[in-house]
Amino acid sequence: MKETEKKNNTIWKRLTRHRLFLPIVCLLVVLLINVIKTPDFFSISINNGVLYGYLIDIINRASELVILAVGMTLVTAASGGQDISVGAVMAVSGAVCCQILSGGQVSTNQFQNPLILAVLAALIASVLCGAFNGILVANLHIQPMVATLILFTAGRGIAQLVTKGQITYVRVDAYKVFGGYIGSCPIPTPIFIAIFIVILMTLALKKTALGLYIESVGINGTASRLVGLNSTMIKFLTYIICGLLSGAAGIVASSRIYSADANNIGLNMEMDAILAVALGGNVLGGGKFSLAGSIIGAYTIQALTTTLYAMNVSSDQLPVYKAVVVVIIVVLQSPVFQKYVKSRKVKKEAIRMLEEGK
Amino acid sequence: MKKKRVNSSTFLLLITIGLFILMYAAGMIIFKEKGFAKPQMFLNLFISNAGLIVIGCGMTLVMITGGIDISVGSVTALVCMLSAYAMENKGMSAFSAVGISLLIGLAYGAVQGALVAYLEIQPFIVTLAGMFFGRGMTAVVSTEMISIKNELFLKWANAKIYLPIGTYNKKGIFQQAYLYPTVIIALVVVLLITIMLKFTNFGRKLYAVGGNRQSALMMGINVRKTIFLAYLLDGFLAGLGGFLFCLNSCAGFVEQAKGIEMDAISSAVIGGTLLSGGVGTVIGTLFGVLIKGTIASLITTQGTLSSWWVRITLSALLCFFIVLQAVIAGAKRKK
């Protein structure tokens, strides 16, 4: 009897100790609330030849967030800080893409320039934004959040500059593909894009030593420099990757609304992306990271957002709930709190042993 | 005679003051016909930025300890909204609005201070959450704009203090230059904080903690308490600044004061406060705010440029000063 209990105990312990335990539990809790609130939550139907349902909506809408969360995870791991300009970079990328496609007009019904050129230009623009952040953080040793604060405020202004203060519409079906559907495929394209990027990044991190390098730079920059890693270059690289991914997310977001709305594309996304990284069990102070955790975190947040919308919470009030969740997570993660919990455990153990000794 | 050495922080402050004088003089020469040289134009810089000056003072305190507070903008929005709600929808007096504003500020300061100082969470994350919480709570109170019609409040808001200087307008009538009480409050705050930083025990502790946390601890300073008090004071000043902002706008709405945290941070940085902590003056921040105000009024006077040019120029200026600080810090390290 006691033997099985012990065995159960160890399995339970191993389960709870797993890094992805907390993120998965969070996701399950959010889904459970949904099932109780709306019983037809998991039902998926086919309307007009496309998949339709709450679950599909969550996975679809979370695509940009997943892409951003991947970049944010790398930046967090290498530099111990977050890039808060991702939302603004999304706006810049969307603006560049739409402006080139429309050839400078406010609205267009056919491409003025080839699509591939526009997409490439948008990605280059966002890589430049990433490089700017990277130089400030890696070469000039400025705190990541303060350095990215510059683009956080200037970014939307630059996007307005690109679109000349207007909302540029691209009413072409070929452009709607990124945010819509490919041909008669019932699954939305953003899901494919997100999966593609995640696989690509996982391969890059696991098949090469890049992932290991990023972790070691994040754990101790000076020590990794001494063993021969170019820590400045690696930090810089993570910001470039983050910029590139933000740009990709920006194109998807602007394709959804087939326009470049400089004020609203990626609004408050930086908060969601940071939240996804934290929810995924990654330490916001840098070091070891788990890409899978961040991705689960991103889906959890989108599920939470959709749930709150379903409960008639307006989009203006949404930040209140998210802020509360952030505070709870960071308090649970904080070293002081963990030390306190540990000392409580040790004390309890000591008392128990004392009593047993008697 | 011993020659006084100019250290890096006074150097940054001197650059700021020089830049302000240069920009204003350039404005006076270029836009002379549009009234840029009038004394009232100069006073307007203070009138429209009174709230920001007070908020900037709080930001400077926090930045001296090596932290940052990006929740001030949403605290301002929350203060304006709740004051307007209390007076218009609940029929409370204008005095209770003052109380509400300061209490919100203190509550924000206490919670954020406790999380940063005692739980050692990164200030940026804590105040980022604070920023979203404040903005969201503003929407919870009301998503509609509430304009304030309380008589006493409007009397406060429109109480002009005339100065013995002025200009003649086109018809030859003498127009006296004026100030609002908000400006007086803001300048008093600047004076008080300057005295506190220079001459009190607490002020010196702030510099010690920001300069080197470890050695401050070894000197016997209660580091956590000092940081907590800095955030508490910062929250209080954010509440007060929010109220001054409210007196200026006489309304509460969700999008109010968006991005003011960025203005406050850039003002402090432009004014010579180091992001790494340990260095900074409130006088510098005051000049930082004035530079921001000058850019804004130059662009509005020019007329053809859009308003987002203010943001871009300010960001470029911020970038310049941050890089300058980094270069100075790098040079010091090499020494």
Image (spheres, coloured by chain):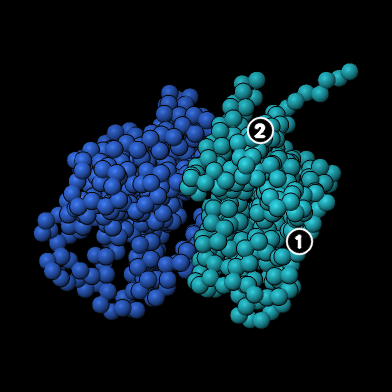
Chain colours: A blue, B cyan
From the top left corner, tell me how far across and down residue B196 is, in percent.
81, 48
From the top left corner, tell me how far across and down residue A22 is, in percent.
41, 60
Q: Report the amino acid beneath label 1.
A: Lys
Residue B253 or residue A202, whichever sits in front: B253
| Rendered image: mark on residue A305 | none
- The residue that label 2 is drawn on is B22
Query: Which residue is painted at 61% across and 56% down in the image?
Result: B72
Query: Which residue is painted at 75% across and 48% down in the image?
Result: B167
Query: In the current view of this chain or complex, which residue is farthest to the top?
Result: B1
On screen, residue A342 above or below B305? below
- The residue that label 1 is drawn on is B160
Callout count: 2
Numbered disc 2: what chain?
Answer: B
Secondary structure of residue under mark 2: helix
Mark before the other along the chain sequence, 1 or 2:
2
From the top left corner, tell me how far across and down residue B172 is, in percent.
74, 51
On screen, residue B136 above or below B53? below
Query: Which residue is painted at 75% across and 64% down in the image?
Result: B159
- Tell me the quarter of the picture where residue A54 sits: bottom left
Secondary structure of residue under mark 1: loop
Q: Report the amino acid beneath label 2.
A: Leu
